[in-house]
Image: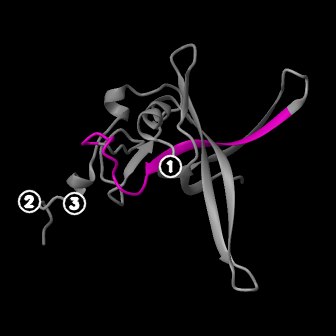
């Protein structure tokens, strides 16, 4: 049995860089900083910041490019991938990346987000997330991207927290 799963909460270090590949696929890459705070033996607070290279594909990349900005606090769920290549000088280079499966915007809602600015769902149906944050999940099918009408579902924190009538039996 094997498991390759990463869960991160941190702040975006730079605006996502979006590339469009032949065949129409999009890829977004950006950095994410996670900071661990602890007290040392002398009682002084110490911080260790780790930088992660995040990569998102297809609709997830397009949505990340539209709504993620430097400084945004986000939750990323994905898997680790390491790869190598030869640079222009013939030197072997290595990189470790997080391939994002889910991205959730955290913190206060930004005025740049659309009124219905949350995405969710790998099954193609809209449902509120556990919190009134903005949530993006890549499509369930890895073989072919879903049409935008099925993969981009919008639910707002206003919808979740509305005081309107509900269908609860109590």
* Circle 1 residue: 71
Residue 128 placed where, x, y %?
Answer: 30, 53
Range covered by the magenta-colored residues: 93-116
Residue 139 placed where, x, y %?
Answer: 45, 36
Please give the name of the residue rendered at 63% of the width and 62% of the height, measured from the top-left corner.
Answer: 35
Calculate the distance from the C-alpha at mark 3 to the C-alpha at mark 1: 26 Å
Of the numbered discs 2 and 1, the one sitting upstream in the chain is: 1
Magenta region includes residue 135:
no
Crowd tier of the residue under label 2, counting other residues whose Cα lies within 10 Å: few below 14, some 14–19, many 20 or above: few
Calculate the distance from the C-alpha at mark 3 to the C-alpha at mark 2: 11 Å
Residue 43 placed where, x, y %?
Answer: 69, 85
Q: Is residue 144 above or below residue 70?
A: above
Please give the name of the residue rendered at 50% of the width and 49% of the height, measured from the top-left corner.
Answer: 71
Magenta region includes residue 97:
yes
* Circle 3 residue: 161
Of the numbered discs 3 and 1, the one sitting upstream in the chain is: 1
Q: Is residue 140 above or below residue 6?
A: above
Toward the viewer: 60 or 149?
Answer: 60
């Amino acid at each position: 049995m094997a498991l390759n799963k990463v869960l991160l909460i941190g702040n975006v270090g730079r605006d996502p860089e979006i590339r469009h590949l032949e065949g129409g696929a999009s890829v977004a890459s950006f950095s994410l900083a996670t900071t661990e705070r602890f007290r040392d033996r002398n009682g002084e607070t110490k911080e260790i910041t780790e930088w992660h290279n995040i990569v998102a594909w297809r609709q997830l990349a397009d949505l990340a490019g539209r709504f993620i900005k430097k400084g945004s606090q986000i939750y990323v769920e994905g898997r680790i991938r390491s790869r190598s290549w030869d640079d222009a000088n013939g030197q072997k280079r290595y990189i470790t990346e997080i391939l994002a499966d889910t991205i959730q915007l955290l913190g206060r809602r930004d005025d740049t987000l659309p009124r219905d600015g949350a995405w969710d769902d790998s099954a193609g149906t809209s449902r509120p997330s556990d919190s009134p944050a903005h949530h993006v999940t890549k499509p369930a099918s890895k073989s072919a991207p879903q049409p935008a009408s099925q993969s981009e579902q919008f639910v707002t924190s206003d919808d979740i927290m509305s005081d309107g009538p509900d269908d609860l039996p109590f």
